[in-house]
C-alpha cells in the first residue's frame, strides 16, 4: 500500500493530523531510522518520500519540491550538510529544511549550512517530531487548537534493523580501512541507540576510543563484526 492511500483527501491540518497536506523527503541511509520517520509522517498526515544517499536525493529534487526536506548528516556518499547548503540557495526553497544526526556536535554546522532546525536522533516521540516541523511553519499553516498525540514511542519493525545489519556486513566485506570504519561506527552508533541495543553500542564506542593513527583496532573490529553477524541471524564471510 502506498503511503498516500492512508491519508484523508482533505488537506487541511487537524489536531490529529497536524502535517496534513505536506510532502516530506527524508534523506536517511538507515532502514530502521527511515521506518521510524515513515510511521511518524503517516500518523501526522504527511506524505513521505525517501532517499538513502545524496545521489538519490538529488534525483528526487530534480522532479519535485517537497514541503519539507529532512537530511541526515552522515550519508554513504558524502555529507548531508552539502545538500542542505545547496537547497538553501535553491529557488524555490523548500518551506522546511532540517538536518538530523545522532551526534549533537553537528547542530551548529547544520545551522551554518542553512538548516532551519536540527533533529537529534533517535526520534521516538511523535509529539517531538511534529513540534520540530511545525515550529518552522507560519502560524496559518499550523492546526488550530491543541494537538492530539499518541504518547507511546514509535517502534519500527525489527526486520528493518536486520536490514541495516546486513547492509553494514556488506560494507565491511568490501574492506576494513579507516574511512570505512569511520562510516560504520557513525551509522551503527545511531541505529544501535535507536534500537536500544546497548551491547552493540558499547562495541561501537570501544572501537571509536581505540582507533589510533595506525588505524582501527583489529580486535575491536572483529568483535563488532561478530555482533553484526549475530544480529543478521546467520554467519557470513567478512
Image (spheres, helix red, strand yellow):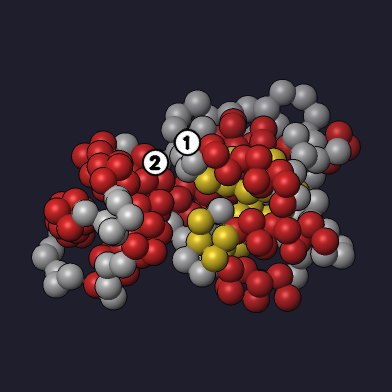
Look at discs 1 and 2 and give the one toward the viewer.
2
Contact? badges 1 and 2 (CB < 8 Å): yes
Q: Quadrant of residue 126?
A: top right
Q: Nearer the viewer, residue 181 or 159?
A: 181
Q: Nearer the viewer, residue 163 or 170?
A: 170
Q: Is residue 121 left or right of residue 9?
A: left
Which residue, as the protein is rendered here, is positioned at the far top? 146
- At 11% from the left edge and 65% from the top edge, which residue is drawn? 235
Where's residue 22, x and y in %? 73, 52
Q: Secondary structure at mark 2?
A: helix
- At 25% from the left edge and 42% from the top edge, which residue is drawn? 206
Q: Is residue 99 left or right of residue 160?
A: right
Does label 1 or label 2 sit earlier along the sequence? 1
Residue 194 - label:
2
Residue that numbered label 1 is attached to: 124
Q: Quadrant of residue 80?
A: bottom right
Where's residue 120, x and y in %? 54, 38
Task: Let me know if residue 234 appears in the view.
Answer: yes
Amino acid at each position: 500500500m502506498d503511503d498516500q492511500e492512508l491519508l484523508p483527501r482533505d488537506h487541511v491540518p487537524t489536531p490529529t493530523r497536524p502535517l496534513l497536506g505536506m510532502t516530506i523527503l527524508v534523506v536517511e541511509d538507515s532502514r530502521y531510522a527511515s521506518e521510524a520517520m515513515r510511521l511518524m509522517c503517516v500518523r501526522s498526515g504527511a506524505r513521505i518520500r525517501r532517499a538513502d544517499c545524496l545521489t538519490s536525493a538529488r534525483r528526487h529534487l530534480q522532479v519535485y519540491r517537497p514541503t519539507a526536506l529532512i537530511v541526515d548528516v552522515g550519508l554513504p556518499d558524502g555529507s548531508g550538510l552539502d545538500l542542505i547548503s545547496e537547497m538553501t540557495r535553491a529557488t524555490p526553497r523548500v518551506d522546511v529544511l532540517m538536518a538530523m544526526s545522532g551526534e549533537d556536535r553537528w547542530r551548529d554546522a547544520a545551522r551554518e549550512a542553512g538548516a532551519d532546525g536540527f533533529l537529534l536522533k533517535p526520534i521516538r516521540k511523535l509529539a517531538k517530531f511534529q513540534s520540530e516541523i511545525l515550529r518552522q511553519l507560519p502560524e496559518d499553516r499550523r492546526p488550530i487548537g491543541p494537538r492530539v498525540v499518541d504518547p507511546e514511542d514509535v517502534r519500527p519493525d525489527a526486520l528493518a534493523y536486520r536490514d541495516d545489519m546486513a547492509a553494514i556486513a556488506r560494507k565491511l566485506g568490501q574492506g576494513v580501512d579507516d574511512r570505512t570504519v569511520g562510516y560504520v561506527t557513525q551509522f551503527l552508533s545511531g541505529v544501535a541507540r535507536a534500537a536500544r541495543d546497548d551491547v552493540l553500542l558499547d562495541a561501537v564506542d570501544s572501537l571509536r576510543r581505540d582507533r589510533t593513527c595506525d588505524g582501527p583496532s583489529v580486535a575491536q573490529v572483529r568483535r563488532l563484526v561478530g555482533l553484526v553477524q549475530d544480529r543478521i541471524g546467520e554467519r557470513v564471510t567478512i
